[in-house]
Amino acid sequence: MLALIFGGLAFTVKAAESVIDSVIAYPSAEHPRNSEGDLVVLKDGTFLVGWTDFYGGAPSDFAQARISGARSTDGGRTWGDHFTLVENTGGMNIMSVSFLRIQTGEILFFYCVKNTKTDLKLYVRRSADEARTWSEPLRITPETGYHVMNNARAVQLKDGRIICPVAWTEEAIRKGEVYRSVMYFSDDNGHAWQRGKGETFCGQRGAMEPGVIELKDGRFLEIIRTQFGMIWHAYSSDRGDTWTEARPWTVVTPEAPSTLARLPDNGDLLLVYNPIAQMSGVSHSGRRTPMGAAISNDEGNTWLKMKLVENDLTQTYAYFSVRIHGERVLLVYHSALHDRSTLKFKSIPIAWFRE
């Protein structure tokens, strides 16, 4: 059974001359997977991208990986040479990049250090010189366990609080594994961190890979990857400290992460996600294809538009970074065929999503 967010789905993408489409990193036998990336725009207009660069020929979540980087000085049309942002300091790998330019003008750089299937921790570094140098890493999650924060997830509220949405479990990839989502937050621009009081629960494998956004009424919205063929959601009225009970949201998707952003021209929400779920006979509620984007003008209660960003159904698409720069949406994501993942970039005018 196929489940769709809308009554029908046309597998076409309207060509737009103003869409910029490029490849940041191709896979190879030595580097089979390039994924979980994020982008920050530097003050001189340069685009800096960081991503999980798996090396040694294995693409598994538990294979060796470092954080690599690349820069573009022409709006993402071309990318310079790859370089190492952070060498592998984990027993297994380091992965999942989030950049956040905070209100002080500094850039925070988050990533996860994975030592074992029971030991995954979130760290942050900071730069006051536009990513030329970085501070020593600061651990955000001191507790025992496996703590996951997806790429492009850290946010700063209007009042200055910085929030990192984390899914944690005692041990990854085991029978009976259950994830709970919890927020870690800082009220001093990322120098000190504390764990929120509340946790979000779902059934089956749990509340996975959460993302958060501040709503116009001051509440916080959390969206959650689940095994139910739908995004689930919860709300916070105390700046992310505690949360309402998680419930199904308005969007169908497979067991895959989705990403929310707010458009600056009129305040609409933009959701980037996989718009089809298959609820029987397959794992993960179906393949992560195609790649769609939808707009909501009522804070996610209903969705007015859905367009296909990628429609090659031989590929899968996941781990979307969505950044707004001027009148354009900047997307970084991976496109995978079998066990090879290409890191891709698109720059799309906001108006394209409303055509």
Image (tube, rainbow, N blue to C red):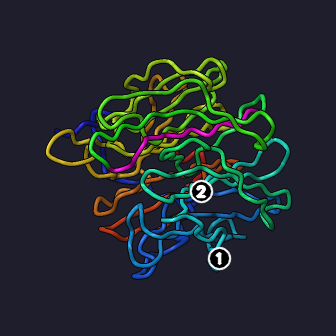
Q: Is residue 24 above or below residue 8?
A: below
Q: Residue at x 43, y 23 (%)?
A: 246
Horizontal and vertical percent for residue 290?
Answer: 35, 52
Give the residue number, with chain letter if any, for mark 1.
83
Amino acid type shown at disc 1: Phe
Q: Residue at x 45, y 34 (%)?
A: 180
Q: How many marks?
A: 2
Amino acid type shown at disc 2: Val
Q: Closer to the N terminus: mark 1 or mark 2? A: 1
Which is nearer the eye, 341 or 167? Answer: 167
Q: Judge from the rendering whether residue 104 lies leftward or rightward of residue 252; answer left or right.
A: right
Q: Residue at x 34, y 33 (%)?
A: 230
Horizontal and vertical percent for residue 8?
Answer: 27, 38
Horizontal and vertical percent for residue 197?
Answer: 59, 24
Q: Is residue 62 above or below residue 261?
A: below
Could you say which quadrant of the image residue 126 lies in?
bottom right
The circle drawn on residue 97 is: 2
Chain part drawn in magenta: 161-173
Which is nearer the eye, 20 or 160? Answer: 160
